[in-house]
Amino acid sequence: MSRVRVALFLLLTVLGTAEAQPKKRVAVLNFDYATVQSGVAALFGSNQDVGKGIADLLVDKLVGDGTYSVIERKALDKILAEQNFSNSDRADPTSAAKIARVLGVDAMIIGSITQFGRDDKKTNIGGMGSRLGSYGIGGVSRSKSTAVVQITARMIDTSTAEILASATSKNEASREGTGIIGSGGSWAGMGAGALDMRSSNFADTILGEATTKTVADLARQLEQKAGSLPTNTVQIEGLVADASPDGTVIVNVGSKAGVKAGDKLQVKHLGREIRDPATGKVIRRIEELVGTIAITEVDEQSAVGKFISPPVSPAKVGDAVSTAK
């Protein structure tokens, strides 16, 4: 085999292996911005949820780069509402791990914004500025606006609430003759009062530039941690609620239990129970494997699947379903 063929074979092998490895699934909670909240309100004239804005920008970046599979915002918001998740829980690893288990993700990303706003400086220009000033002639000064953004992000283990990885980024952007959020420091892109940090209006400001740099750097750091994350396997247990002759099965567990399209579940007939003669407790259940279904549709309370090969015997209502081993 020629060297070119060998190289091509090795390259295809590596690519095939990479494609075979599923992406780690993550969700991004709105970042905590309590540290900068008063400054944000003063800057924009009202309180703005910059923590949500940062989370949205980070999700866009992670999705675009393709290292992770990221849970969409609608699914996350629905779970947060069901779990009575409050703004004060944003930086709490225990709360994040709880939400992650419900979502069935490998890790939850939480974080805090520690700097977000102005760092104005005045500088004298002209090599003789200070010397001329001492003679009463005066120096020439210019105003330079600088925006500073610093964010810390943490990846939380879904089982233990342990911090698996941490990333911190701080960036600045400066211009002369304009405020950090527009001409004279005013903000004309607020619309109906809600700050859209994904808009080009915001991105074109000095603060938007610093924010973009910081989020991009955070995403890069988090992507480098992907290989070290454990894979979280959600254990599904439920029952067959309906079985059709064509092999379609409806089960009584859905997205709320962590079921998602593409999952494979084993279907088993439940046989007799073996009890301990001394205590009367069930020590074993005799089960007969019917076959394995692949989930095709999911809602909150149920899921639909079809057998991926002919079952040993027809499925029936009350059969057990569980995560395929």
Image (cartoon, rainbow, N blue to C red):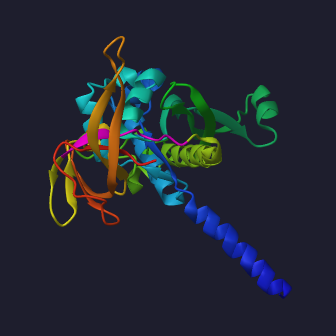
Question: Mainly helix, strand or loop, the magenta region?
Answer: loop
At 27% from the left and 27% from the top, the residue drawn is 83
Q: Is residue 232 magenta?
A: yes
Dividing the picture into quarters, in which one does residue 14 lie?
Answer: bottom right
x and y percentages locating residue 209 in the rendered image? 53, 49
Asked whether residue 24 is in view, the answer is: yes
- Closer to the camera in the image, 6 or 172: 6
Q: 102 or 325, which is in the foreground?
A: 325
**Residue farthest along the top direction in this orientation:** 278
Q: Choose top left, top right, bottom left or bottom right for residue 312.
A: bottom left
Give the x, y percent position of residue 303. Answer: 23, 50
Q: What is the x, y in percent for residue 307?
A: 30, 62
- Residue 137 part of the magenta-drawn span: no
- Magenta stretch: give its range: 231-240
Residue 258 makes an appearance in the image = no
Q: Which residue extends farthest bottom?
A: 2
Residue, x 57% and y 49% (percent of image)? 216
Looking at the image, residue 87 lies above or below residue 53: above
| The N terminus, quarter of image | bottom right
249 displayed left or right of 325: left
Q: Is residue 191 left or right of residue 236?
A: left
